[in-house]
Amino acid sequence: MNLEHKLNTLPTRPGVYLMKNEAGEIIYVGKAKNLRSRVRSYFQQSKDHSPKVRVLVSHIADFEYIVTDSEVEALILENNLIKEHTPWYNVRLKDDKTYPYIKVTLNEHFPRVLLVRSRVNDGARYFGPYTDVGAVRETLAFLRAIFPVRTCRKEIKPGASDRPCLNYHLGRCEAPCAGLVSVDAYRAMIDEVVAFLEGKVDHVIPKLTAKMQEAADKLEYEKAARIRDQIQAIRKMAERQKIVADHAEDQDYLGYARVSDLACVQVFYVRGGKVVGRDHFLLDCSQEEDERELMAAFIKQFYAQAAYIPRSIFLPLELEEMEDLESWLTELRGSRTYLHVPKRGAKRELVQMVMENASTVLQVARSREERREKDIAEALQQLAEVLGLAAPPTRIEAYDISNTQGKEIVASMVVMIDGKLAGDEYRRFRIRDVQDGPNDYLAMQEVIGRRFRRGLQEQAEGRAGKFGAFPDLVLIDGGKGQLNAAIHVRDELSLDIPFISLAERLEEVFVEGRSEPVNLPRTTKGSLLLQRLRDEAHRFALTYHRNLRGKASRSSMLDQIPGIGPKRKKALLRHFGTVKAIRQASVDELCQVEGINRKVAQEIYQYMHGAEGEA
Protein backbone atom coordinates (compact mmCIF):
# COMPACT_ATOMS: atom_id res chain seq x y z
CA MET A 1 0.00 0.00 0.00
CA ASN A 2 1.56 3.33 -1.05
CA LEU A 3 1.83 6.38 1.18
CA GLU A 4 -0.88 8.38 -0.59
CA HIS A 5 -3.43 5.60 -0.24
CA LYS A 6 -2.62 5.14 3.48
CA LEU A 7 -3.09 8.88 4.04
CA ASN A 8 -6.50 8.78 2.35
CA THR A 9 -7.70 5.84 4.43
CA LEU A 10 -6.66 7.12 7.86
CA PRO A 11 -9.43 6.97 10.50
CA THR A 12 -10.67 10.08 12.29
CA ARG A 13 -10.34 8.46 15.73
CA PRO A 14 -7.69 9.13 18.40
CA GLY A 15 -4.52 7.05 18.29
CA VAL A 16 -0.76 6.86 17.91
CA TYR A 17 1.27 7.07 14.69
CA LEU A 18 4.79 5.74 14.04
CA MET A 19 6.87 7.36 11.30
CA LYS A 20 9.48 5.16 9.57
CA ASN A 21 12.48 5.81 7.32
CA GLU A 22 13.54 3.83 4.24
CA ALA A 23 15.29 1.24 6.43
CA GLY A 24 12.04 0.57 8.28
CA GLU A 25 13.31 2.17 11.49
CA ILE A 26 10.86 4.08 13.66
CA ILE A 27 12.09 7.68 13.72
CA TYR A 28 9.15 9.41 15.41
CA VAL A 29 6.15 8.47 17.55
CA GLY A 30 3.26 10.87 18.07
CA LYS A 31 -0.31 10.88 19.35
CA ALA A 32 -3.38 12.51 17.87
CA LYS A 33 -6.99 13.31 18.77
CA ASN A 34 -7.78 12.79 15.09
CA LEU A 35 -5.30 10.55 13.27
CA ARG A 36 -6.38 11.61 9.78
CA SER A 37 -5.98 15.35 10.26
CA ARG A 38 -2.82 15.06 12.35
CA VAL A 39 -0.84 12.68 10.14
CA ARG A 40 -1.96 14.35 6.88
CA SER A 41 -0.78 17.72 8.25
CA TYR A 42 2.84 16.51 8.02
CA PHE A 43 2.58 16.17 4.24
CA GLN A 44 0.89 19.50 3.52
CA GLN A 45 2.45 22.94 2.90
CA SER A 46 6.03 22.71 4.22
CA LYS A 47 6.29 26.48 4.70
CA ASP A 48 3.93 26.15 7.67
CA HIS A 49 6.15 23.55 9.37
CA SER A 50 8.84 24.08 11.95
CA PRO A 51 12.43 23.28 10.89
CA LYS A 52 12.26 20.06 12.90
CA VAL A 53 9.11 18.84 11.13
CA ARG A 54 10.57 19.67 7.70
CA VAL A 55 13.64 17.56 8.45
CA LEU A 56 11.48 14.77 9.87
CA VAL A 57 9.19 14.68 6.82
CA SER A 58 12.18 14.47 4.48
CA HIS A 59 13.08 11.13 6.09
CA ILE A 60 9.59 9.58 6.25
CA ALA A 61 9.18 6.64 3.88
CA ASP A 62 6.24 4.95 5.60
CA PHE A 63 4.08 5.09 8.70
CA GLU A 64 1.90 2.90 10.89
CA TYR A 65 -0.88 3.83 13.28
CA ILE A 66 -2.71 2.33 16.23
CA VAL A 67 -6.26 3.38 17.03
CA THR A 68 -7.18 3.90 20.71
CA ASP A 69 -10.45 4.45 22.55
CA SER A 70 -9.46 7.80 24.07
CA GLU A 71 -6.86 10.55 23.96
CA VAL A 72 -5.53 9.55 27.39
CA GLU A 73 -5.07 5.98 26.19
CA ALA A 74 -3.19 7.35 23.15
CA LEU A 75 -0.95 9.40 25.47
CA ILE A 76 -0.07 6.30 27.54
CA LEU A 77 0.63 4.23 24.43
CA GLU A 78 2.75 7.01 22.90
CA ASN A 79 4.91 7.16 26.02
CA ASN A 80 5.39 3.37 26.09
CA LEU A 81 6.36 3.26 22.41
CA ILE A 82 8.86 6.11 22.78
CA LYS A 83 10.48 4.27 25.68
CA GLU A 84 10.59 1.01 23.70
CA HIS A 85 11.90 2.36 20.39
CA THR A 86 13.76 5.58 21.44
CA PRO A 87 13.03 7.29 18.08
CA TRP A 88 15.59 9.80 16.87
CA TYR A 89 13.18 12.74 16.51
CA ASN A 90 11.42 12.33 19.88
CA VAL A 91 12.58 14.03 23.07
CA ARG A 92 14.17 11.35 25.27
CA LEU A 93 15.30 11.33 28.87
CA LYS A 94 19.01 10.54 28.89
CA ASP A 95 19.82 7.22 30.63
CA ASP A 96 16.36 7.04 32.16
CA LYS A 97 16.73 3.31 32.88
CA THR A 98 19.47 3.89 35.42
CA TYR A 99 17.70 6.33 37.74
CA PRO A 100 17.55 4.85 41.25
CA TYR A 101 14.65 4.71 43.70
CA ILE A 102 14.46 4.36 47.46
CA LYS A 103 12.23 1.39 48.24
CA VAL A 104 10.49 0.73 51.56
CA THR A 105 9.38 -2.90 51.55
CA LEU A 106 5.97 -2.40 53.14
CA ASN A 107 4.99 -5.78 51.68
CA GLU A 108 7.16 -7.45 54.37
CA HIS A 109 6.27 -7.98 58.05
CA PHE A 110 9.43 -6.08 59.05
CA PRO A 111 10.19 -3.67 56.15
CA ARG A 112 13.64 -2.70 54.88
CA VAL A 113 14.83 0.48 53.13
CA LEU A 114 16.74 -0.20 49.92
CA LEU A 115 18.23 1.38 46.81
CA VAL A 116 16.71 -0.21 43.70
CA ARG A 117 16.95 0.46 39.96
CA SER A 118 13.40 -0.33 38.91
CA ARG A 119 9.91 0.12 40.23
CA VAL A 120 7.46 -2.79 40.25
CA ASN A 121 3.93 -3.22 41.55
CA ASP A 122 4.80 -5.38 44.57
CA GLY A 123 3.11 -3.54 47.42
CA ALA A 124 6.28 -1.68 48.45
CA ARG A 125 6.52 2.13 48.71
CA TYR A 126 8.90 3.83 46.27
CA PHE A 127 10.50 7.28 46.37
CA GLY A 128 12.15 8.80 43.31
CA PRO A 129 13.43 8.48 40.69
CA TYR A 130 16.63 10.35 41.56
CA THR A 131 19.45 11.28 39.20
CA ASP A 132 22.23 11.30 41.79
CA VAL A 133 22.90 7.80 43.10
CA GLY A 134 25.52 9.21 45.49
CA ALA A 135 22.90 11.42 47.13
CA VAL A 136 20.57 8.42 47.44
CA ARG A 137 23.29 6.41 49.19
CA GLU A 138 23.94 9.33 51.55
CA THR A 139 20.23 9.52 52.35
CA LEU A 140 20.11 5.80 53.09
CA ALA A 141 23.19 6.04 55.31
CA PHE A 142 21.58 8.97 57.17
CA LEU A 143 18.33 7.05 57.61
CA ARG A 144 20.08 3.95 58.90
CA ALA A 145 22.09 6.06 61.32
CA ILE A 146 18.98 7.51 62.96
CA PHE A 147 16.50 4.65 62.48
CA PRO A 148 17.51 1.06 63.37
CA VAL A 149 16.00 -0.48 60.23
CA ARG A 150 17.08 -4.03 59.45
CA THR A 151 19.35 -4.53 56.43
CA CYS A 152 19.44 -8.35 56.17
CA ARG A 153 17.58 -10.24 53.45
CA LYS A 154 15.97 -12.79 55.75
CA GLU A 155 12.28 -13.54 55.47
CA ILE A 156 11.28 -12.68 59.05
CA LYS A 157 7.86 -13.57 60.39
CA PRO A 158 6.31 -12.44 63.68
CA GLY A 159 7.52 -14.53 66.58
CA ALA A 160 10.86 -15.47 65.01
CA SER A 161 13.56 -16.52 67.49
CA ASP A 162 16.87 -16.49 65.62
CA ARG A 163 20.06 -15.27 67.21
CA PRO A 164 20.50 -11.50 66.80
CA CYS A 165 23.37 -10.43 64.58
CA LEU A 166 26.15 -7.91 65.20
CA ASN A 167 23.97 -5.00 64.03
CA TYR A 168 21.71 -5.51 67.05
CA HIS A 169 24.63 -5.33 69.46
CA LEU A 170 25.85 -2.15 67.71
CA GLY A 171 22.42 -0.55 68.11
CA ARG A 172 21.78 -0.54 64.34
CA CYS A 173 18.88 -3.01 64.35
CA GLU A 174 16.12 -3.90 66.80
CA ALA A 175 16.49 -7.64 66.00
CA PRO A 176 13.01 -8.58 64.74
CA CYS A 177 14.62 -11.91 63.75
CA ALA A 178 15.04 -12.65 67.48
CA GLY A 179 11.57 -11.47 68.42
CA LEU A 180 12.95 -8.46 70.33
CA VAL A 181 10.59 -5.97 68.69
CA SER A 182 6.90 -6.32 67.87
CA VAL A 183 5.44 -5.80 64.42
CA ASP A 184 3.49 -2.74 65.64
CA ALA A 185 6.54 -1.09 67.23
CA TYR A 186 8.69 -1.77 64.16
CA ARG A 187 5.97 -0.48 61.84
CA ALA A 188 5.70 2.72 63.89
CA MET A 189 9.39 3.33 63.21
CA ILE A 190 8.87 2.62 59.49
CA ASP A 191 6.03 5.18 59.46
CA GLU A 192 8.58 7.74 60.70
CA VAL A 193 10.99 6.71 57.94
CA VAL A 194 8.27 7.14 55.31
CA ALA A 195 7.30 10.55 56.75
CA PHE A 196 10.96 11.58 56.62
CA LEU A 197 11.25 10.49 52.95
CA GLU A 198 8.04 12.38 52.16
CA GLY A 199 9.70 15.53 53.49
CA LYS A 200 7.50 15.70 56.58
CA VAL A 201 10.43 16.23 58.90
CA ASP A 202 8.41 18.29 61.36
CA HIS A 203 6.05 15.34 61.88
CA VAL A 204 8.90 13.07 62.94
CA ILE A 205 10.49 15.28 65.61
CA PRO A 206 7.53 15.34 68.09
CA LYS A 207 7.29 11.54 68.01
CA LEU A 208 11.00 11.15 68.63
CA THR A 209 10.88 13.73 71.40
CA ALA A 210 8.13 11.76 73.14
CA LYS A 211 10.20 8.58 72.80
CA MET A 212 13.23 10.34 74.25
CA GLN A 213 11.25 11.56 77.25
CA GLU A 214 9.79 8.08 77.78
CA ALA A 215 13.26 6.53 77.74
CA ALA A 216 14.55 9.15 80.19
CA ASP A 217 11.62 8.50 82.55
CA LYS A 218 12.53 4.82 82.55
CA LEU A 219 16.19 5.75 83.32
CA GLU A 220 17.23 4.35 79.91
CA TYR A 221 19.72 7.17 79.43
CA GLU A 222 21.73 5.60 76.60
CA LYS A 223 18.57 5.12 74.54
CA ALA A 224 17.43 8.67 75.34
CA ALA A 225 20.81 10.06 74.26
CA ARG A 226 20.65 8.13 70.99
CA ILE A 227 17.19 9.54 70.25
CA ARG A 228 18.42 13.05 71.17
CA ASP A 229 21.18 12.71 68.56
CA GLN A 230 18.60 11.58 66.00
CA ILE A 231 16.47 14.66 66.69
CA GLN A 232 19.46 16.99 66.32
CA ALA A 233 20.43 15.40 62.99
CA ILE A 234 16.89 15.73 61.63
CA ARG A 235 16.61 19.36 62.80
CA LYS A 236 19.83 20.22 60.94
CA MET A 237 18.35 18.80 57.78
CA ALA A 238 15.03 20.61 58.35
CA GLU A 239 16.87 23.94 58.68
CA ARG A 240 18.11 23.59 55.11
CA GLN A 241 14.56 23.40 53.75
CA LYS A 242 13.21 26.65 52.37
CA ILE A 243 9.65 27.70 53.32
CA VAL A 244 7.80 28.81 50.18
CA ALA A 245 4.13 28.58 51.18
CA ASP A 246 1.96 28.79 54.25
CA HIS A 247 -0.16 25.76 53.34
CA ALA A 248 0.41 22.00 53.40
CA GLU A 249 -0.37 21.18 49.74
CA ASP A 250 2.16 19.01 47.91
CA GLN A 251 3.46 20.64 44.74
CA ASP A 252 6.09 20.19 42.03
CA TYR A 253 7.64 23.18 40.23
CA LEU A 254 9.19 22.58 36.79
CA GLY A 255 11.61 24.73 34.81
CA TYR A 256 13.75 24.10 31.74
CA ALA A 257 16.73 25.33 29.74
CA ARG A 258 18.00 24.23 26.34
CA VAL A 259 21.15 24.66 24.29
CA SER A 260 21.45 22.99 20.89
CA ASP A 261 20.44 19.31 21.14
CA LEU A 262 20.61 19.07 24.94
CA ALA A 263 17.96 20.23 27.39
CA CYS A 264 17.68 20.24 31.15
CA VAL A 265 14.47 20.13 33.19
CA GLN A 266 14.70 21.02 36.88
CA VAL A 267 12.10 19.82 39.40
CA PHE A 268 11.61 21.37 42.84
CA TYR A 269 9.64 19.20 45.27
CA VAL A 270 7.49 21.20 47.69
CA ARG A 271 5.94 19.18 50.51
CA GLY A 272 4.01 20.79 53.33
CA GLY A 273 4.94 24.26 52.09
CA LYS A 274 8.71 23.60 52.08
CA VAL A 275 11.18 22.80 49.31
CA VAL A 276 12.32 19.37 50.50
CA GLY A 277 14.38 18.44 47.47
CA ARG A 278 15.20 19.13 43.86
CA ASP A 279 16.47 17.17 40.92
CA HIS A 280 17.47 17.77 37.34
CA PHE A 281 17.09 15.62 34.25
CA LEU A 282 18.94 15.90 30.94
CA LEU A 283 17.09 15.25 27.71
CA ASP A 284 18.19 14.57 24.14
CA CYS A 285 16.26 16.68 21.67
CA SER A 286 16.61 18.24 18.24
CA GLN A 287 17.89 21.80 17.95
CA GLU A 288 14.54 22.94 16.55
CA GLU A 289 12.47 21.27 19.28
CA ASP A 290 9.40 23.26 20.31
CA GLU A 291 9.59 24.17 23.99
CA ARG A 292 6.02 23.06 24.63
CA GLU A 293 6.69 19.65 23.12
CA LEU A 294 9.87 19.37 25.17
CA MET A 295 8.03 20.02 28.45
CA ALA A 296 5.14 17.74 27.52
CA ALA A 297 7.55 14.93 26.64
CA PHE A 298 9.33 15.31 29.96
CA ILE A 299 6.08 15.24 31.95
CA LYS A 300 5.02 12.02 30.19
CA GLN A 301 8.31 10.22 30.71
CA PHE A 302 9.06 11.48 34.22
CA TYR A 303 5.67 11.04 35.85
CA ALA A 304 5.11 7.67 34.16
CA GLN A 305 7.85 6.31 36.43
CA ALA A 306 7.64 8.74 39.36
CA ALA A 307 6.91 7.16 42.73
CA TYR A 308 4.66 10.07 43.76
CA ILE A 309 2.55 12.62 41.89
CA PRO A 310 1.48 15.75 43.81
CA ARG A 311 -1.87 17.46 43.56
CA SER A 312 -0.45 20.53 41.76
CA ILE A 313 2.33 20.84 39.19
CA PHE A 314 3.48 24.34 38.20
CA LEU A 315 4.90 24.95 34.72
CA PRO A 316 6.64 27.87 33.04
CA LEU A 317 4.40 27.81 29.92
CA GLU A 318 1.08 26.56 28.58
CA LEU A 319 1.09 23.18 26.80
CA GLU A 320 -1.08 22.13 23.87
CA GLU A 321 -2.33 18.97 25.61
CA MET A 322 -2.91 20.28 29.14
CA GLU A 323 -6.30 18.60 29.57
CA ASP A 324 -5.07 15.21 28.33
CA LEU A 325 -2.03 15.39 30.60
CA GLU A 326 -4.17 16.35 33.61
CA SER A 327 -6.53 13.42 32.94
CA TRP A 328 -3.61 11.02 32.60
CA LEU A 329 -1.88 12.29 35.76
CA THR A 330 -5.17 12.08 37.65
CA GLU A 331 -5.50 8.46 36.57
CA LEU A 332 -1.94 7.69 37.71
CA ARG A 333 -2.34 9.49 41.03
CA GLY A 334 -5.81 8.15 41.79
CA SER A 335 -7.14 11.62 42.64
CA ARG A 336 -7.34 14.99 40.90
CA THR A 337 -4.10 16.50 39.64
CA TYR A 338 -3.80 20.02 38.21
CA LEU A 339 -1.29 21.65 35.87
CA HIS A 340 -0.85 25.39 36.50
CA VAL A 341 1.05 28.18 34.74
CA PRO A 342 1.34 30.95 37.36
CA LYS A 343 1.32 34.46 35.92
CA ARG A 344 2.35 36.45 38.98
CA GLY A 345 3.10 36.26 42.68
CA ALA A 346 5.21 33.85 44.76
CA LYS A 347 4.46 30.83 42.60
CA ARG A 348 5.65 32.62 39.45
CA GLU A 349 8.80 33.72 41.26
CA LEU A 350 9.52 30.13 42.30
CA VAL A 351 9.04 28.91 38.71
CA GLN A 352 11.53 31.57 37.59
CA MET A 353 13.99 30.37 40.22
CA VAL A 354 13.61 26.80 38.96
CA MET A 355 14.25 28.03 35.40
CA GLU A 356 17.44 29.77 36.55
CA ASN A 357 18.58 26.58 38.29
CA ALA A 358 17.94 24.57 35.13
CA SER A 359 20.04 27.02 33.11
CA THR A 360 22.93 26.80 35.59
CA VAL A 361 22.85 23.00 35.64
CA LEU A 362 22.76 22.85 31.84
CA GLN A 363 25.78 25.15 31.52
CA VAL A 364 27.76 22.90 33.87
CA ALA A 365 26.58 19.75 32.06
CA ARG A 366 27.48 21.13 28.64
CA SER A 367 30.93 22.28 29.69
CA ARG A 368 31.54 18.87 31.29
CA GLU A 369 30.23 17.12 28.17
CA GLU A 370 32.32 19.28 25.85
CA ARG A 371 35.44 18.65 27.93
CA ARG A 372 34.74 14.91 27.94
CA GLU A 373 34.19 14.87 24.16
CA LYS A 374 37.43 16.76 23.64
CA ASP A 375 39.36 14.36 25.87
CA ILE A 376 37.91 11.35 24.04
CA ALA A 377 38.78 12.81 20.63
CA GLU A 378 42.35 13.53 21.77
CA ALA A 379 42.69 10.03 23.26
CA LEU A 380 41.49 8.29 20.09
CA GLN A 381 43.72 10.49 17.92
CA GLN A 382 46.69 9.67 20.16
CA LEU A 383 46.01 5.93 19.82
CA ALA A 384 45.84 6.25 16.04
CA GLU A 385 49.20 8.04 15.94
CA VAL A 386 51.04 5.77 18.39
CA LEU A 387 49.64 2.51 16.96
CA GLY A 388 49.98 3.58 13.32
CA LEU A 389 46.27 3.35 12.53
CA ALA A 390 44.84 4.98 9.41
CA ALA A 391 42.22 6.82 11.48
CA PRO A 392 41.09 7.08 15.10
CA PRO A 393 39.30 3.81 15.99
CA THR A 394 35.50 4.06 16.09
CA ARG A 395 34.83 0.64 17.62
CA ILE A 396 37.24 -0.95 20.10
CA GLU A 397 36.66 -4.39 21.63
CA ALA A 398 38.42 -5.63 24.78
CA TYR A 399 38.71 -9.26 25.97
CA ASP A 400 39.51 -10.69 29.39
CA ILE A 401 39.63 -14.19 30.95
CA SER A 402 38.51 -15.02 34.51
CA ASN A 403 38.81 -18.33 36.39
CA THR A 404 39.62 -19.91 39.75
CA GLN A 405 42.39 -22.49 39.43
CA GLY A 406 41.09 -23.45 36.03
CA LYS A 407 37.47 -23.88 37.11
CA GLU A 408 34.45 -22.01 35.74
CA ILE A 409 36.59 -20.32 33.07
CA VAL A 410 34.77 -17.40 31.43
CA ALA A 411 35.61 -14.59 29.04
CA SER A 412 34.21 -11.13 28.48
CA MET A 413 33.92 -8.97 25.38
CA VAL A 414 33.43 -5.28 26.17
CA VAL A 415 32.82 -2.67 23.47
CA MET A 416 33.63 1.02 23.23
CA ILE A 417 32.09 3.05 20.41
CA ASP A 418 33.37 6.58 19.76
CA GLY A 419 35.20 6.44 23.07
CA LYS A 420 32.09 5.55 25.10
CA LEU A 421 31.25 2.19 26.64
CA ALA A 422 28.39 0.50 24.76
CA GLY A 423 26.77 -1.87 27.25
CA ASP A 424 24.28 -3.25 24.71
CA GLU A 425 27.20 -4.64 22.71
CA TYR A 426 28.83 -6.54 25.59
CA ARG A 427 29.07 -10.33 25.28
CA ARG A 428 30.22 -13.07 27.64
CA PHE A 429 31.44 -16.62 27.03
CA ARG A 430 31.85 -19.83 29.02
CA ILE A 431 35.07 -21.47 27.91
CA ARG A 432 34.41 -25.03 26.74
CA ASP A 433 37.69 -26.49 25.50
CA VAL A 434 40.00 -25.72 28.45
CA GLN A 435 39.30 -28.32 31.14
CA ASP A 436 42.65 -29.48 32.55
CA GLY A 437 43.59 -26.43 34.62
CA PRO A 438 44.17 -22.74 33.93
CA ASN A 439 45.44 -21.84 30.46
CA ASP A 440 44.73 -18.21 29.59
CA TYR A 441 46.35 -18.56 26.18
CA LEU A 442 44.05 -21.36 25.01
CA ALA A 443 41.03 -19.68 26.64
CA MET A 444 41.80 -16.44 24.78
CA GLN A 445 42.19 -18.31 21.50
CA GLU A 446 38.84 -19.99 22.02
CA VAL A 447 36.93 -16.77 22.69
CA ILE A 448 38.56 -14.89 19.80
CA GLY A 449 37.82 -17.80 17.47
CA ARG A 450 34.22 -18.14 18.55
CA ARG A 451 33.55 -14.41 18.37
CA PHE A 452 34.96 -13.80 14.89
CA ARG A 453 33.81 -17.08 13.30
CA ARG A 454 30.29 -16.20 14.39
CA GLY A 455 30.74 -12.69 12.99
CA LEU A 456 32.02 -13.98 9.64
CA GLN A 457 29.05 -16.35 9.43
CA GLU A 458 26.58 -13.53 10.09
CA GLN A 459 28.26 -11.34 7.47
CA ALA A 460 28.19 -14.17 4.90
CA GLU A 461 24.48 -14.72 5.55
CA GLY A 462 23.82 -10.98 5.27
CA ARG A 463 22.06 -10.71 8.62
CA ALA A 464 22.51 -8.28 11.49
CA GLY A 465 23.36 -10.53 14.44
CA LYS A 466 25.15 -10.05 17.73
CA PHE A 467 28.64 -10.39 16.21
CA GLY A 468 28.33 -8.99 12.68
CA ALA A 469 29.93 -5.60 13.46
CA PHE A 470 33.75 -5.89 13.49
CA PRO A 471 36.05 -3.61 15.51
CA ASP A 472 38.69 -1.18 14.28
CA LEU A 473 40.92 -2.25 17.17
CA VAL A 474 41.06 -5.22 19.56
CA LEU A 475 42.49 -4.90 23.09
CA ILE A 476 43.67 -8.05 24.88
CA ASP A 477 44.13 -8.01 28.65
CA GLY A 478 47.64 -9.35 29.28
CA GLY A 479 51.15 -9.27 27.94
CA LYS A 480 52.89 -10.50 24.81
CA GLY A 481 51.86 -14.13 25.36
CA GLN A 482 48.14 -13.43 25.40
CA LEU A 483 48.51 -11.05 22.45
CA ASN A 484 50.37 -13.60 20.31
CA ALA A 485 47.82 -16.29 21.14
CA ALA A 486 44.97 -14.03 19.98
CA ILE A 487 46.83 -12.91 16.83
CA HIS A 488 47.37 -16.58 15.87
CA VAL A 489 43.61 -17.13 15.66
CA ARG A 490 43.06 -13.79 13.90
CA ASP A 491 45.55 -14.77 11.19
CA GLU A 492 43.94 -18.19 10.76
CA LEU A 493 40.68 -16.38 10.00
CA SER A 494 42.46 -13.94 7.59
CA LEU A 495 41.19 -10.89 9.44
CA ASP A 496 42.75 -7.46 8.87
CA ILE A 497 42.19 -6.03 12.35
CA PRO A 498 44.96 -4.55 14.55
CA PHE A 499 45.36 -6.34 17.91
CA ILE A 500 47.14 -4.85 20.94
CA SER A 501 47.49 -5.88 24.58
CA LEU A 502 47.71 -4.00 27.87
CA ALA A 503 49.88 -5.51 30.61
CA GLU A 504 48.41 -4.58 33.98
CA ARG A 505 51.50 -4.19 36.17
CA LEU A 506 53.06 -1.23 34.35
CA GLU A 507 50.15 -0.51 31.95
CA GLU A 508 52.45 -1.27 29.01
CA VAL A 509 50.94 -1.47 25.52
CA PHE A 510 52.25 -4.23 23.24
CA VAL A 511 51.64 -4.39 19.49
CA GLU A 512 52.19 -7.05 16.89
CA GLY A 513 55.77 -7.71 15.80
CA ARG A 514 57.50 -5.72 18.56
CA SER A 515 59.14 -7.21 21.64
CA GLU A 516 59.15 -3.90 23.52
CA PRO A 517 56.06 -1.88 24.49
CA VAL A 518 55.12 1.20 22.47
CA ASN A 519 55.73 4.68 23.81
CA LEU A 520 52.39 5.42 25.45
CA PRO A 521 52.93 6.57 29.06
CA ARG A 522 50.30 5.36 31.52
CA THR A 523 49.06 8.88 32.36
CA THR A 524 48.35 9.96 28.77
CA LYS A 525 44.75 10.23 27.57
CA GLY A 526 45.15 7.36 25.13
CA SER A 527 46.51 5.03 27.82
CA LEU A 528 43.84 6.06 30.32
CA LEU A 529 41.14 5.26 27.76
CA LEU A 530 42.63 1.78 27.23
CA GLN A 531 42.90 1.26 30.99
CA ARG A 532 39.26 2.17 31.44
CA LEU A 533 38.22 -0.28 28.73
CA ARG A 534 40.45 -3.04 30.13
CA ASP A 535 39.11 -2.49 33.66
CA GLU A 536 35.55 -2.72 32.36
CA ALA A 537 36.34 -6.00 30.58
CA HIS A 538 37.87 -7.30 33.81
CA ARG A 539 34.82 -6.22 35.85
CA PHE A 540 32.39 -7.78 33.39
CA ALA A 541 34.27 -11.09 33.30
CA LEU A 542 34.68 -11.19 37.08
CA THR A 543 30.98 -10.51 37.69
CA TYR A 544 30.00 -13.35 35.36
CA HIS A 545 32.54 -15.67 36.97
CA ARG A 546 31.30 -14.87 40.47
CA ASN A 547 27.71 -15.57 39.45
CA LEU A 548 28.66 -18.96 38.05
CA ARG A 549 30.84 -19.75 41.04
CA GLY A 550 28.03 -18.80 43.43
CA LYS A 551 25.57 -21.02 41.57
CA ALA A 552 28.06 -23.88 41.58
CA SER A 553 28.69 -23.41 45.30
CA ARG A 554 25.00 -23.45 46.15
CA SER A 555 24.43 -26.42 43.89
CA SER A 556 27.37 -28.42 45.23
CA MET A 557 26.27 -27.97 48.85
CA LEU A 558 22.48 -27.78 49.01
CA ASP A 559 21.69 -30.08 46.09
CA GLN A 560 23.71 -32.91 47.61
CA ILE A 561 21.89 -32.94 50.95
CA PRO A 562 19.44 -35.85 51.24
CA GLY A 563 15.85 -34.65 51.28
CA ILE A 564 16.60 -31.20 49.80
CA GLY A 565 14.83 -30.53 46.52
CA PRO A 566 14.32 -27.26 44.60
CA LYS A 567 11.46 -26.05 46.84
CA ARG A 568 13.27 -26.63 50.12
CA LYS A 569 16.48 -25.18 48.71
CA LYS A 570 14.59 -22.03 47.66
CA ALA A 571 12.90 -21.78 51.07
CA LEU A 572 16.24 -22.11 52.89
CA LEU A 573 17.92 -19.41 50.79
CA ARG A 574 14.91 -17.10 51.12
CA HIS A 575 14.90 -17.52 54.90
CA PHE A 576 18.63 -17.31 55.63
CA GLY A 577 19.88 -15.35 52.60
CA THR A 578 23.21 -17.20 52.15
CA VAL A 579 24.68 -20.71 52.37
CA LYS A 580 27.00 -19.42 55.10
CA ALA A 581 24.00 -18.40 57.24
CA ILE A 582 22.43 -21.84 56.72
CA ARG A 583 25.64 -23.47 57.91
CA GLN A 584 25.66 -21.31 61.04
CA ALA A 585 22.04 -22.11 61.90
CA SER A 586 21.08 -24.57 64.65
CA VAL A 587 18.69 -27.48 64.13
CA ASP A 588 15.92 -25.52 65.88
CA GLU A 589 16.49 -22.52 63.62
CA LEU A 590 16.43 -24.75 60.53
CA CYS A 591 13.09 -26.21 61.69
CA GLN A 592 11.54 -22.73 61.45
CA VAL A 593 11.90 -22.76 57.67
CA GLU A 594 8.69 -23.64 55.87
CA GLY A 595 8.77 -27.26 54.69
CA ILE A 596 11.74 -28.28 56.89
CA ASN A 597 10.91 -30.85 59.59
CA ARG A 598 13.28 -31.93 62.37
CA LYS A 599 14.59 -34.97 60.52
CA VAL A 600 15.48 -32.91 57.44
CA ALA A 601 16.93 -30.16 59.66
CA GLN A 602 19.23 -32.69 61.30
CA GLU A 603 20.31 -33.98 57.88
CA ILE A 604 21.14 -30.41 56.79
CA TYR A 605 23.02 -29.67 60.01
CA GLN A 606 25.07 -32.85 59.85
CA TYR A 607 25.91 -32.40 56.17
CA MET A 608 26.82 -28.73 56.54
CA HIS A 609 29.13 -29.30 59.46
CA GLY A 610 30.62 -32.39 57.92
CA ALA A 611 31.23 -30.52 54.64
CA GLU A 612 32.49 -27.37 56.34
CA GLY A 613 36.11 -28.06 55.62
CA GLU A 614 35.39 -28.92 51.99
CA ALA A 615 33.58 -25.67 51.13
Image (cartoon, rainbow, N blue to C red):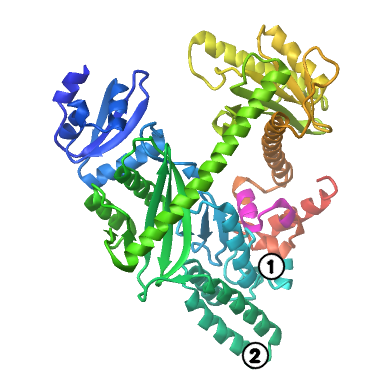
In the shown orientation, is residue 314 left or right of residue 190? left
* Left or right of 132, for residue 44: left
Q: Please give left or right for residue 243 compared with residue 103 in the image.
A: left
For residue 162, the mark is: 1
Q: CA distance from mark 2 to mark 1?
A: 30 Å
Instruction: Please state which amino acid type lies under the numbered disc 2.
Output: Ala
Would residue 252 be visible to someone looking at this image?
Answer: no
> As rendered, which of 188 and 565 lies closer to the eye?
188
Could you classify mark 1 by the number of other residues whose Cα lies within 10 Å: few (under 14), some (14-19), or many (20 or more)?
some
Q: Is residue 347 magenta?
A: no
Neighbor class of circle 2 (other Cα within 10 Å; few <14, some 14-19, many 20+) is: some
Closer to us: 323 or 615: 323
Residue bearing mark 2:
216
Front one among 35 and 217: 35
Amino acid carrying label 1: it is Asp
Lower sequence index among marks 2 and 1: 1
Q: Secondary structure at mark 1?
A: loop
Is 166 rendered above or below residue 50? below
The residue segment tinted magenta is 569-581
Q: Is residue 246 visible?
A: yes
Image quadrant occupied by the N terminus = top left
